[in-house]
Image (cartoon, coloured by chain):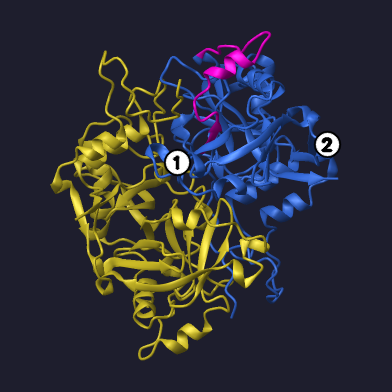
Chain colours: A blue, B yellow
Amino acid sequence: MKTFLILAAAAAATPAPKPAPAPSEIVAAAPKGDWVAIAPADLLVMDLASGKRVVIQLMPPPFSQGWVGNIRKLAAARWWDGTSINRVQDNYVVQWGDADGEDKAKAKVVPGGLATVPESDYSIRPDKTQFKTLWSFRGSYAAGSFTNWGRNGSDFRDPYSNVVSFSGGFPVGLRTQLIDSSAQGAADFPLQAWPVHCYGMVGVGRDMPPDTGTGAELYTVIGHAPRHLDRNIALVGRVISGIEHLSSLPRGTGPLGFYEKPEERTGITSIRIGTEVQGLPRYEYLSTESASFAAYTDARANRRDAFFIQPAGGADICNIPVPVRMTK
Amino acid sequence: MKTFLILAAAAAATPAPKPAPAPSEIVAAAPKGDWVAIAPADLLVMDLASGKRVVIQLMPPPFSQGWVGNIRKLAAARWWDGTSINRVQDNYVVQWGDADGEDKAKAKVVPGGLATVPESDYSIRPDKTQFKTLWSFRGSYAAGSFTNWGRNGSDFRDPYSNVVSFSGGFPVGLRTQLIDSSAQGAADFPLQAWPVHCYGMVGVGRDMPPDTGTGAELYTVIGHAPRHLDRNIALVGRVISGIEHLSSLPRGTGPLGFYEKPEERTGITSIRIGTEVQGLPRYEYLSTESASFAAYTDARANRRDAFFIQPAGGADICNIPVPVRMTK
């Protein structure tokens, strides 16, 4: 007997009452129109000395654009070429950049220099057009008449925000206020919105506040979502390919998982914006405003495929990873 | 400038207004009486062919004791000696056991054999004495007059249960019912309780339901908490030392992260109950019913130490890892 843990999809069991599709099956069946192409200009491609490649999708507006602008300049200035991965802390982060710090980054990037981004940019105060977008996932989820949509007390109860949603393919936390409008009844309006620290998200290392970091030193999450970092550090993207080349690196034995010896570091050959990389595959994400994504979310929250006997009745925002695929 | 991301504890900054202690500082200051020794009889010690050691604390009663009993028998029968780690799926699990399956385990363990544990044992229906224990963390947290204690709408909103707590050092999910007792007013009583899939938890691989697995094939979580598995698979313990020797293994490239070639597997030299292992250190966990743990929980939910500018106001149960330490 070969025991397959979880998602034993290929098991040729008796095809009695057909179970509900697994989330992966919903994604596989999503129509072409539900996928959104990621522009090569929004990719950051990291080639490691090990020959492995990691691809990062940069954070779309309206979030963190000051830091993203710095990162574009740093890539253009070849800042990271010859730097290294310096820190691997188990169940936390992998961090890279110049092992001696980032002071040289400011000098290297001329003209224009790097922006100093204020702490207030860790989140946004959405205007009307923005909150429509922020809310659109919840709208499409509700339109799909799935269970328990709503404020807290819903499928997506969250200890770190009063509402979670998705925007432009990224998970977001929202601080909302219930406003009673006589025309439409009470509705939740986002007062503040921010990207959240899920597995694979990429953030900006910084010193003690009020420093906010430049973007020259980056990390990615390789463990349980450290959501306490939300609104405390800038998030500038997420790894969409090759995270296993970072998450499987040996853990550093120094404080905070820093490598104690220089030879333990993995070298970075280059980091480039996708438009500069020859032969890059095309990547697409499943629109977080699509009916397919709403169905996928419902299935993540209520597993009814054959392996499961107890649907959870809810899901953590970081346990609903946005599907990304590679195309020719 | 050396940029330290997160917890720049050693930074010799200006000691102006003293910030609140970090969770790690609260743990370091916990009195001896707040620590609970873990009996060697409740440890499972896995020695890898790489020379590395992984130590697992077995799940205490009242949870999963049928499978834990099987695991004790399997260790006594040397079942795992010469088996291997067969599956490493990124952001999910590392799984080990006999690469050819677990049928031989039943034959090997004689006399008495292995118990077949029913699916109903994925959770318990607590009796009065048990629910007092299940509730005790929440009680000590409330007694510390920390913020927002209570049912959902609290610091610990959870999409997978209506209340989360800790019991005997392990995180638990609860299904509760609000019962109005005239003597004491309305109170929440646990109807069902189960251990939850946080990082490092150890579970039992199984086939399709109604199979529940024997315990011969085990996995540990190496990514974001896959809480949809709660109440669908047995949890039998957690890794308390050496998880980095599992989480940093190369990811398998086959379906579900299984290794495609036998030579990719990491061998297991032996798995023993702690009482059979010479020179094992002593381990202790911070009592989840102690005042120190309540203060630690509050600090995890509301980071006010110097690095942070925005306390979250809440925490995910799996982002409150129970502190474990090694003593002489």
Image vertical order of residue A64 relative to residue B263, above or below: above
The residue pinned by badge 1 equals: A261
What distance separates the C-alpha of mark 1 from that of mark 2?
34 Å
Residues marked 1 and 2 touching at CB (< 8 Å): no
**Which of the labelled discs sits on residue A278, or is there none?**
2
Front position in the image: B322 or B245: B245
B157 above or below A136? below
Instruction: Give the letter of the chain under mark 1.
Output: A
Residue sitting at x 53%, y 83%:
B103
Q: Nearer the viewer, mark 1 or mark 2?
A: 1
Q: Are marks 1 and 2 on the same chain?
A: yes
Side (left or right) of B156 relative to A104: left
Q: Is residue B142 magenta?
A: no
- Outermost residue toward the bottom in this view: B111
**Amino acid at the residue labelled 1:** Lys
In the image shown, does A115 or B126 lie closer to the viewer?
Answer: A115
Give the extent of the magenta segment: A94-118
Q: Is residue B141 visible?
A: no
